Image (cartoon, rainbow, N blue to C red):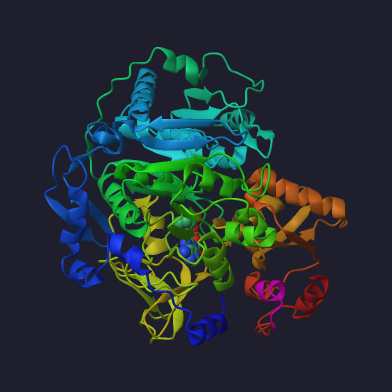
Amino acid sequence: MSDETIEVLLEEGKVFPPPEDFKKQAWVKDDTIYEKAEKDFEGFWATFAEELHWFKKWDRVLEWDPPWAKWFINGKINVSYNCLDRHIQTFRKNKAAIIWEGEPGDIKIYTYWDLYREVCKFANVLKGLGVKKGDRVAIYMPMVPELPIAMLACTRIGAPHSIVFGGFSPASLRDRIIDAEAKILITTDGGWRRGKVVALKENADEALRETPSIEHVIVVKRTENDIPFKKGRDLWWHELMKDASSVCEAEPMDAEDILYILYTSGTTAKPKGVVHTTGGYLTGVYATTKWVFDLKEEDTFWCTADIGWVTGHSYIVYGPLALGTTSVMFEGAPDYPDKDRFWGIVEKYGVTVFYTAPTAIRAFMQWGKKYPEMHDLSTLRLLGSVGEPINPAAWMWYYETIGKSTCPIVDTWWQTETGMILITPLPGVTTLKPGSATKPFPSLKADVVDEKGTPVPPGGGGYLVMKTPWPAMLRTLYKDPDRYVKTYWDRYGKEIYFPGDGAKKDMDGYIWILGRVDDVMNVSGHRISTMEVESALVDHPAVAEAAVVARPHDVKGQGIMAFVILKGEQSASSELEADLKKHVGTVIGPIARPDWIVFTEDLPKTRSGKIMRRLLKDIAEGKELGDTTTLRDSSIVEKIKDSVK
Ligand code: PRX
């Protein structure tokens, strides 16, 4: 978002204080909480932790030896116990925990009691296969109920899971399994995507050719297509579950034991294994689910993310279930069989709180009002947004067309690394400004600083930083503590977290996130590194060299533009262009497929041979070119510019 857009909005005075009736019923209706929480930082978090079940209470809330944090020292807790056992001892026993709808329209509703039994059974299955506390379990599944069941079963026995998004390629899966040294892989025969079967098992088999750590593959039957099955190694979920006992004690875990690893893109081609631990993570997602989404017993919460990403981990599974909420889970796409699918789901289950991504909102806008108008959306009372900056026009459309100008919108800023929402409105107290994630969650401090780390004055722009630790923060990068320190805690000293985003602070101290400042793109709310796409391109036999940058895209927010130099004997053609796009999709996954490919004879390079992506970005964005004097051959940028439409 440009500074001008922000200024215009502010001048127009488009601000939205919480509606009175919302405020009256909200968990947080008094903004003095910010002051109180800051004054008693540890006490604030202890209050949330006390709402959870602990086998043994912690001795201290926080040990902060920057950049190393430990939360709830010596506390013993189990996440699955908190998401299940705690509720089945109450009236929630037969409350819907997960309402699941498959793409073909099949429905399954799991009460807390049902879910508890399934999780215990699968935990016993894992144990029976020799999975012990601390062993890693890889999961590569579509959005089927067995996915949260598998996650909760892992947490029940203390086996960290590593979920790989079902849209990732065999190579991506392989690398993640190898890095995590996973013992078991859980997958399905296939997944439904717009009426077609995604061949997950075949992908998995390809990945497994080079993953010696995997002992067994557990396969859920979903699409019922024929799949290769390796005797001895591959096992059917339903057969294993048939005789499994539905009693399985939850393992008391140390608050700092690993809960899961989740890989995310960084500025190099090698993904980072973000490590989340148990007690702090659960406390953080519990607190934010409760306060940001203002969830009450009678709410029906739908977060439309895929569980393969952090949003699904925290706000489909762990946060909502820890809170005893009814969480909706949907397998399919928003436009299949038609573009009103989401709104049909909202109506059918009476969704009250709806959380989605700006990229989806922009697609809804393009499809038009007619689709939401086909359904009764009057149950909605709160809307949320996550994943990328939401442009004010999309915010307003979401507010008026989906929320009928009565639902507050929480624009929540956070990351895979932060585990929980950090910058966000609290819907009962915050006056909203379309496009701003507003302020840090109570007790936390964020700021916008310049190159040297000095806070910018109100109205200024710079780099976003976090100045306090938070309970769900990543503890390290798996097997790579040096990269953890270097990536996040090196720029402004060890006490200040650098998330890699640019931001602006307005006159009221509101934070406006402007997007990534490193070589990471944000495509449809998903992080993809330019390096990953470049290495996938040069992996193609026709490509000599490639440089990749993000370019504004109407629906995706950012699209991927690749500048490609072909090998001598190759010539550019639309077939080759299509083939390169397909190749990247195969190597990384369809989300990384470039939107535009520009064939070029050379790339703008400095005298030392470094590609100046900054200039390519200017070209891609159609901006005036920045300084070209350090280029070895400055005529090349003009040539490239001419070939970009
Ligand atoms: O650039 C920010 C953007 O998404 C990045 C984090 O991506 P990921 O780890 O995949 O997690 C996405 C879901 C939590 C951030 O560094 N981002 C996320 N939320 C927002 C956002 N940018 C602007 N506004 C947001 N609300």
Left/right of residue 129 with respect to residue 230 in the rendered view: left
Of 24 and 458, the residue lying toward us: 24
Left/right of residue 385 with respect to residue 170 in the rendered view: left
| 491 vs 369: above or below | below
Left/right of residue 347 with respect to residue 131 in the rendered view: right
Q: Which image quadrant: the C terminus? A: bottom right
Identity of the residue drawn at 28% across and 67% down:
444
Q: Is residue 314 in the magenta section?
A: no
| 182 vs 488: above or below | above
Please state the horizontal and vertical placement of residue 81, each as a whole percent of the image: 26, 34
Visible residue check, residue 276 = yes
State which quadrant residue 492 falls in.
bottom left
Left/right of residue 158 with respect to residue 173 in the rendered view: left
Identity of the residue drawn at 57% across and 31% down:
106
Of 530 and 392, the residue lying toward us: 392
| 160 vs 281: above or below | above
Identity of the residue drawn at 56% across and 75% down:
1
Please state the horizontal and vertical placement of residue 640, each as a whole percent of the image: 79, 73
The residue furthest left is: 59
Identity of the residue drawn at 81% across and 66% down:
601
What segment is highlighted magenta in the picture? 617-624
State which quadrant residue 430 falls in.
bottom left
Q: Is residue 621 in the magenta section?
A: yes
Of 395 and 268, the residue lying toward us: 395
Please state the horizontal and vertical placement of residue 91, each as a whole percent of the image: 26, 35
Please state the horizontal and vertical placement of residue 345, each as a whole percent of the image: 54, 44
